[in-house]
Image: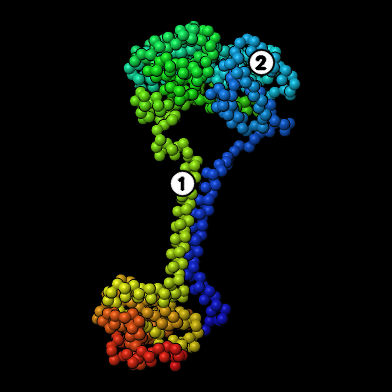
Amino acid sequence: MPSMREYIKIHQNKLNISFTGWKCKQRHGMFIFSLAIILLLAVTFPCRAFAQEKIESPSAQPLRILCISSFNYSFPTVPDQLNGLADGLDTLFVDIDYEFMDAKNYYKAADFAAFHDYLVYKINQSKPFDLIVLCDDTALHFCMNYYDEMFSEVPIVFMGVNNLADAATFATRDNVTGITETLDFESNLELIQTLFPDRTHISIVIDSTSTAQGEYSEFQNYLENRESDDNLNFTVINASNYSADGFARALQQANQRDSLIIDLDYMEDGEGNVYTLKTGTIMITNNAPDVPIWRITLSDMGMGVFGGISYSYYDAGVRAGEIAVQILTGAAPSAIPIEENGIYQAYFDQAQMDKYMIQSSQLPLDSVILNPHQSVFNFYKENMVMMNLILLIIALMIIIIIILSRQNQQRGKIIQQDYLTQMPNRLFIIRRFSSLIESGNPFGLIMLDIDHFKKINDTWGHLIGDELLIGVAERLKSFPKKEAIFARIGGDEFMGLVFNADREKVDAICNELLTKMKDDFPTSAGNIHITVSVGAAIYPTDTTKAEHLQNYADAALYETKKNGRDGYFLFESSMINNIEKHNLQKNQKEP
């Protein structure tokens, strides 16, 4: 007989069996739950998980950078340029000082002189700068004019310069390098011909400013080297050669069904009237309302501009910042050649696409559509962070519901399962019994007791008794579930339900049940032979009342025990007197 310690240990193991699978599933569910929480936080609070470590200056002080922009911060290209520059410099510990020339509003010689005096005063009052960044042509020309006086000793990086000749000339200085604003004329003209094959007359709008002339010179060079057999012809409208009225008439003449206008760059007319990007666009659209307006340099749309493949100012800013990092960490500017290969982005306005019946499928794959028609996909793209957050919340809720549902299912299974034998318990079988009564289908009710079980426990111990209970349960579970199902209802008592049964079928199941129990049961104390007593009643043959049916099955069981046990009886009316005797016996200890 096993020791008390072994007995307790084995019972603890058996008690844990019922919960092991549930705990594993619970841990799996909690893993999914935790993963969903992490994803939710990652979307809600995005961060740079793998940000590069900043390189500090040798003095542990920030490196000082002076950034001179040709325009003011409200000019459409400037925010992208400066954001890109800051991101390109992200690996360095830097302090960037921004100065804006605002050349679109202050472009006369006196304005430049005033800016020079202000900048000289500021430089003299501050610590020396470690590097200078120049944005666009006007800043480049300013630096070229005052190079010997102010900038000859400081490394210089320029970006957004349209005049390639000026950029190449300035880059011959040992402390100068940078990025030119190279426009993609080829891709733009190819797309124009694809979208508007009947518009063969192209009007190019410019003025006489250095920026516009630099861009137009670049365009002329492209046309001279262009190999094409198309029938495109080009006309130049230089706003600086016209009064405001004359400029308007020139635009009106371009308002033809075979025409398209490329707004290359202009800011003033011959009378000195200054045009912002917005007012300049309005001037063109008011006087040429039936002509697509194309932009190659700026992507500011929504006021009648059709679109275009534009130079990416943000990416240029990033690259300028990266070049600055190279110089500030030891590279010589003269060893870094100027870069002329730009990065481009296609922008188009939905209203203009509708006007000229252009579909998004006709545009380059990476095109940005401004003011698109609302759709689920577009709404998702525009609100990606919010939508991802909502989707993750929904996913999280679904996961929680699934986890709780499975836990409830497991709890439901546990409370309807006998912990020792892992077979259905009294609660389960009573529920099935009630369901069968409600359905009205015929079935058999079987009651089974292990003979002399108290004596087995007293002789062999409760551990062996439990092993026998498990063995009996396993043999009862071997019946096909479509035919019969059994449950342990307490101690050594088992109850069974035989489905769609008549007297003959119940008799066969009882006989088979006794056959299954005849072989010895292996236990830790060796093989043990036991017998069982069985009684059965049939619904609705014996009774239509649920409370009577179980009593009748108990009466048949009592009849079996009265006749020497190790057998079975089916209920007969002559057994009714056994009911009170059986109930009395159940309340007493077995002799």
Work out whether residue 513 or residue 234 is closer to the camera in this orientation and state it. Answer: 234
**Residue 72's x, y, as percent?**
59, 21
Q: Label 2: few (<14), some or many (≥20) within 10 Å? A: some
Q: Is 93 on the left or on the right of 483, as rendered?
A: right
Q: Is residue 29 above or below residue 115?
A: below
Q: Is 132 on the left or on the right of 409, as rendered?
A: right
Q: CA distance from mark 2 to mark 1?
A: 53 Å
Label 2: element kind:
helix
**Residue 194's x, y, as percent?**
35, 22
The residue shown at (57%, 78%) is 5
What amino acid is found at the position of numbered circle 2 in the picture?
Phe
Numbered badge on residue 115? 2
Query: Does the rendering let one see residue 101?
Result: yes
* Residue 95 sits in quarter: top right
Query: Does the rendering let one see residue 158?
Result: no
**Residue 373's x, y, as percent?**
40, 33
Name which of mark 2 and mark 1 comes first in the sequence: 2
* Residue 82 sits in quarter: top right
Q: Is residue 289 above or below residue 401?
A: above
What amino acid is found at the position of numbered circle 1 in the picture?
Leu
The residue shown at (74%, 23%) is 126
The residue shown at (53%, 18%) is 276
Q: Is 356 on the left or on the right of 214, as rendered?
A: left
Numbered badge on residue 391? 1
* Residue 432 sits in quarter: bottom left
Numbered badge on residue 257? none
Colour style of the rendered protein structure: rainbow
The residue shown at (29%, 82%) is 543
